[in-house]
C-alpha cells in the first residue's frame, strides 16, 4: 500500500488545483472587482454583431466538416513523429506497416476530396 502514496498525493494536488483555483478566482473577483455593466460590456463580442435570426435556423456545416477533417488528418500525421524517432528499432516490419498506414491515409484523403468535402462552394 505504501507505493500508492505518491499517486494519492498527485490526485490530492490535482483536486486542490482543480477546485481551489476557481474558488480563489471567485473570491478575489468579489473582493476586488466591481460589477458595473455598461453598453460596451454587454455588447456581442464573439461575432461583432447582434443576433438577427432564430438560433434554430439551418446553417452550413462545411466549415465544421473541414475542421474535423483537419483534426483527423493532423492527428494521424502525429503518429509519424514517434515512428521516425524509433525507426532504427522497429526494422522492416515497422517501416512497411507505416507505409501501409500512409497509403490508407492518402486513400482517405482522396476519398474525401472526391466526395467534395474540401470544396467551399
Image (cartoon, rainbow, N blue to C red):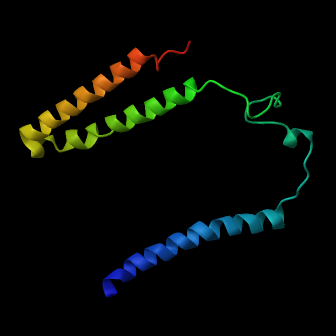
Q: Residue at x 57, y 73 (%)?
A: 16
Please tell me which residue lies in front, 22 or 113. 113
Question: In screen coordinates, is 89 left or right of 17?
Answer: left
Q: Give the quadrant of the N terminus.
A: bottom left
From this view, report whether residue 111 is shown above or below residue 50: above
Q: What percent of the width, then of the height, locates residue 44? A: 81, 36
Viewer-closest of 81 and 101: 101
Residue sitting at the far bottom: 1
Looking at the image, is 78 positioned above or below residue 11?
above
On the rendered structure, is 65 left or right of 44?
left
Could you tell me which residue is drawn at 54 percent across and 72 percent down?
15
Q: Residue furthest left?
A: 92
Please name the residue shown 17% across and 45% down the image.
Answer: 86
Q: Residue 49: x, y in percent?
A: 81, 28
Q: Residue at x 21, y 41 (%)?
A: 83
Q: Position of residue 45 (x, y in %)?
A: 77, 36
Q: How far across and how far down the image is residue 34, in percent?
A: 88, 58
Q: Quadrant of residue 115?
A: top left
Amino acid at each position: 500500500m505504501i507505493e500508492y502514496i505518491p499517486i494519492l498525493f498527485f490526485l490530492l494536488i490535482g483536486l486542490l488545483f482543480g477546485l481551489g483555483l476557481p474558488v480563489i478566482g471567485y473570491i478575489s473577483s468579489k473582493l476586488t472587482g466591481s460589477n458595473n455593466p455598461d453598453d460596451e460590456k454587454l455588447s456581442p463580442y464573439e461575432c461583432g454583431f447582434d443576433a438577427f435570426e432564430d438560433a434554430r435556423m439551418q446553417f452550413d456545416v462545411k466549415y465544421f466538416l473541414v475542421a474535423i477533417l483537419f483534426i483527423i488528418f493532423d492527428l494521424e500525421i502525429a503518429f509519424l513523429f514517434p515512428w521516425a524517432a524509433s525507426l532504427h528499432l522497429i526494422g522492416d516490419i515497422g517501416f512497411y506497416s507505416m507505409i501501409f498506414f500512409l497509403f490508407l491515409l492518402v486513400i482517405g484523403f482522396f476519398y474525401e476530396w472526391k466526395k467534395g468535402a474540401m470544396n467551399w462552394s
